[in-house]
Amino acid sequence: MSEVNSGVVDKAANRLFAGQIAFLKSAPTTGELPEPGLPEIAFAGRSNVGKSSLLNALTGRKALARTSNTPGRTQLLNLFDVGEPPVLRLVDMPGYGYAEAPKKIVDGWKRVVFDYLRGRQSLKRVLLLIDSRRGIGAVDEEVMELLDTAAVSYQIVLTKTDKVKASWVTKLGDEIPLALKKHPAAFPVLLATSAEKNHGIDALRAAVLAAATDDKGLT
């Protein structure tokens, strides 16, 4: 499972996320985003993939991002500046693939998400969260194809690995990197995480900092 990175410990990344992290704003449309400046790392994934919990674990905060058992809770682009002075920006994106929400709301989410992915100059990488219990689904493949077309770098992050057997994570660690070879914009290293058990969080911090600073060595 050489393509899975869950044990990296980067002291600079841990120091960064132990410091100042400030909510900047929520943007209902891309037109209300701040001017491009800081490198941005966006978190995307299906509704209820565990994105808010993972952001809280990443930043060592209990409530930086709101968590909910109700899929589709995040409906805005939520931005957080990391560091003092800020050195990078985290973007919590609306979840996709929630079929039970009203179609008008779903269409609105898609428009905001896809407009951001296509046109944000300061976007360095999208961390595409995949529930380890389900693997990559059809709607995830659609987003991956969009990212490939837009030439936006993205990296797969498995969530909730504490909910499955280690052998299943190993299986995904063998299969997903092979599948990623057909996706030109996919970063080849798979990250395996559990927000509840704090597993893989050091590696995730290192990956975020490396992507923001274009340092390939940390991931």
Image (cartoon, rainbow, N blue to C red):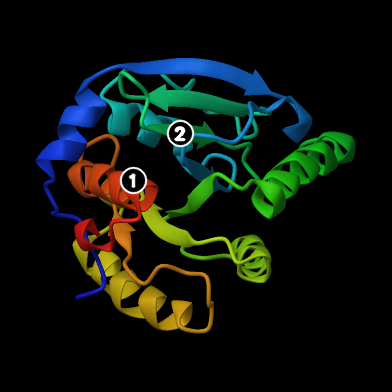
Of residues 141 and 218, which is closer to you in this image?
Answer: 218
Of residues 96 and 10, which is closer to you in this image?
Answer: 10
Quadrant (top left/top right/bottom left/bottom right) for the C terminus: bottom left
Q: Residues within 10 Å of mark 2 (few under 14, many from 20)?
A: many
**Which residue corresponds to the image point at 53% horizontal and 34% vertical from the top-left?**
37
Q: Amino acid at mark 1?
A: Val
Residue 63 in sight: no
Q: Amino acid at mark 2?
A: Leu
Rendered location of residue 185, percent (x, y) = 52, 70
Residue 75 in sight: yes
Describe residue 91's horizontal placement relative to residue 187 as left or right: right
SS of the residue at dot 1?
helix
Most extreme residue toward the right, as rendered?
Answer: 104
* Total labels drawn: 2
Rendered location of residue 100, percent (x, y) = 76, 40
Rendered location of residue 139, percent (x, y) = 66, 61
Describe residue 5's horizontal placement relative to residue 119 as left or right: left
**Which residue corresponds to the image point at 64% horizontal and 30% vertical from the top-left?**
35
Residue 208's mark?
1
